[in-house]
């Protein structure tokens, strides 16, 4: 197992790694819309969604892969009513063949953000 760490994505806010490489797979921790340069939360649903996927992209880049190699994502959203808007933004970051995905509504997310996403990706 190899730990992935980068200052291009938010630092862990607890006792966990940003990502781990095991064999040819990268497992990211859930990313919330923290702007790495400032530590602030992006404001609004669209900005939060874009920031989450930028953070995931930065983590995968640091691991030696990218979103095109994602095999599974899990998206946690605060309101299922936001599904369509988040899905439209998600489609800007993931292309065919799309990764498998789960999307669940949750009661609350860290720092009261609107979404969180984690990715499992393969190394090229």
Image (cartoon, rainbow, N blue to C red):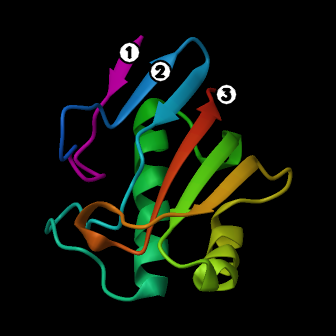
* Relative side of 99 to 38, left or right: right
* Relative side of 109 to 96, left or right: left
Looking at the picture, does residue 39 appear above or below residue 60?
Answer: below
Q: How many marks?
A: 3
Q: Mark 1 and 2 residues: CB-CB less than 8 Å, in contact?
A: yes
Q: How far apart are marks 3 and 2 (CA)?
A: 13 Å
Looking at the picture, does residue 83 appear above or below residue 60?
Answer: below
The residue that appears at 45% across and 85% down in the rendered structure is: 45
The residue that appears at 29% across and 31% down in the rendered structure is: 17
Magenta stretch? 1-11
Q: Mark 3 and 1 residues: CB-CB less than 8 Å, in contact?
A: no
Q: Residue 8: x, y in percent? A: 29, 52
Whether residue 5 is in magenta: the answer is yes
Q: How crowded is mark 3: few (under 14 residues within 10 Å), some or many (20 or more)?
A: few
Tag on residue 60? none
Instruction: List the residue tagged with mark 2.
Output: 21
The residue that appears at 69% across and 52% down in the rendered structure is: 102
Look at discs 3 and 1 and give the one toward the viewer: 1
Tag on residue 2? 1
* Relative side of 16 to 123, left or right: left
Q: Which of marks 3 and 2 is nearer the N terminus?
A: 2
Tag on residue 124? 3
Looking at the picture, does residue 28 appear above or below residue 124?
Answer: below
Quarter of the figure with the C terminus: top right
Q: Residue 116: x, y in percent? A: 45, 60
Q: Residue 47: x, y in percent? A: 42, 82
């Amino acid at each position: 197992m190899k730990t992935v760490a980068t200052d291009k994505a938010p630092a862990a806010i607890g006792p966990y790694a940003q990502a781990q490489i095991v064999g040819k797979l990268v497992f990211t921790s859930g990313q919330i819309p923290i702007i790495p340069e400032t530590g602030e939360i992006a404001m609004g649903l669209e900005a939060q969604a874009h920031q989450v996927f930028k953070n995931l992209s930065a983590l995968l880049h640091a691991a030696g892969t990218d979103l095109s190699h994602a095999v599974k994502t899990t998206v946690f959203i605060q309101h299922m009513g936001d599904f369509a808007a988040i899905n439209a933004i998600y489609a800007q970051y993931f292309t065919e063949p799309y990764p498998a995905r789960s999307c669940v509504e949750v009661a609350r997310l860290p720092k009261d953000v609107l979404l969180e996403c984690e990715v499992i990706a393969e190394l090229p």
